[in-house]
């Protein structure tokens, strides 16, 4: 390959990446909207600061829940896991299983999640958008 060919190839690749960015950015923003404004995932999955505010530095990094049922609920979890792409859940499940969980409400083992996590059954494109957003969180 000549230097000119390499330069043209790199320019074309950059143009393609730039052309795809608005669609990707829109998908991620839609996923953020679904996760934060509709699902309110941060309420359980983000810890709070000493003032009670959600900790923006540890957004969706997992937290101890500050609520519990009045009577014992079988399988109730006192903590919510880290759902960022840097967390153990993401590492164990992977992107495809995260999407499947959000579309079926079932874990990779085929079981529903334990309380208090609701069993979401989102449309495929909505689940993919949420996972695209979560993937941006480290």
Image (cartoon, helix red, strand yellow):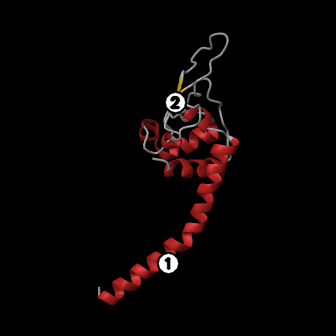
| Left or right, residue 125 beside residue 132 | right
- Viewer-proximal residue among 113 and 49: 49
**Tag count in the figure?**
2
Which quadrant of the figure contains the N terminus? bottom left
Tag on residue 110? Answer: none
Give the quadrant of residue 38.
top right
Q: Position of residue 19 (x, y in %)?
A: 55, 73
Q: CA distance from mark 1 to mark 2?
A: 41 Å
Residue in the picture at 46% in, 76% down: 14
- Of 9 and 69, which appears nearest the observer? 69
Picture quadrant of residue 28? bottom right
Q: Residue furthest front?
A: 51
**What residue lies at 50% left-to-right and 32% top-to-bottom?**
81
Q: Which residue is mark 2?
A: 63
Q: Which residue corresponds to the image point at 66% horizontal and 36% vertical from the top-left?
A: 120
Of circles 1 and 2, which is in front?
2
Q: Are marks 1 and 2 in contact (CB under 8 Å)?
A: no
Q: Earlier in the sequence, mark 1 or mark 2?
A: 1
Coordinates of residue 26 in the picture (x, y in percent): 63, 61
């Amino acid at each position: 390959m000549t230097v000119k060919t390499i330069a043209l190839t790199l320019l074309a690749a950059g143009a393609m990446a730039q052309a795809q960015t608005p669609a990707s950015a829109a998908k991620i923003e839609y996923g953020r909207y679904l996760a934060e404004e509709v699902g309110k995932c941060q309420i359980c999955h983000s810890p709070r600061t000493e003032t009670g505010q959600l900790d923006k530095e540890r957004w969706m990094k997992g937290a101890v829940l500050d609520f519990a049922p009045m009577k014992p609920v079988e399988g109730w979890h006192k903590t919510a896991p880290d759902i960022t792409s840097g967390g153990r859940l993401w590492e164990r499940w992977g992107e495809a299983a995260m999407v499947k969980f959000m579309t079926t409400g079932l874990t990779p083992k085929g079981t529903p999640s334990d309380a208090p996590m609701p069993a979401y059954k989102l449309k495929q494109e909505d689940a993919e958008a949420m996972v695209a957003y979560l993937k941006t969180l480290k």
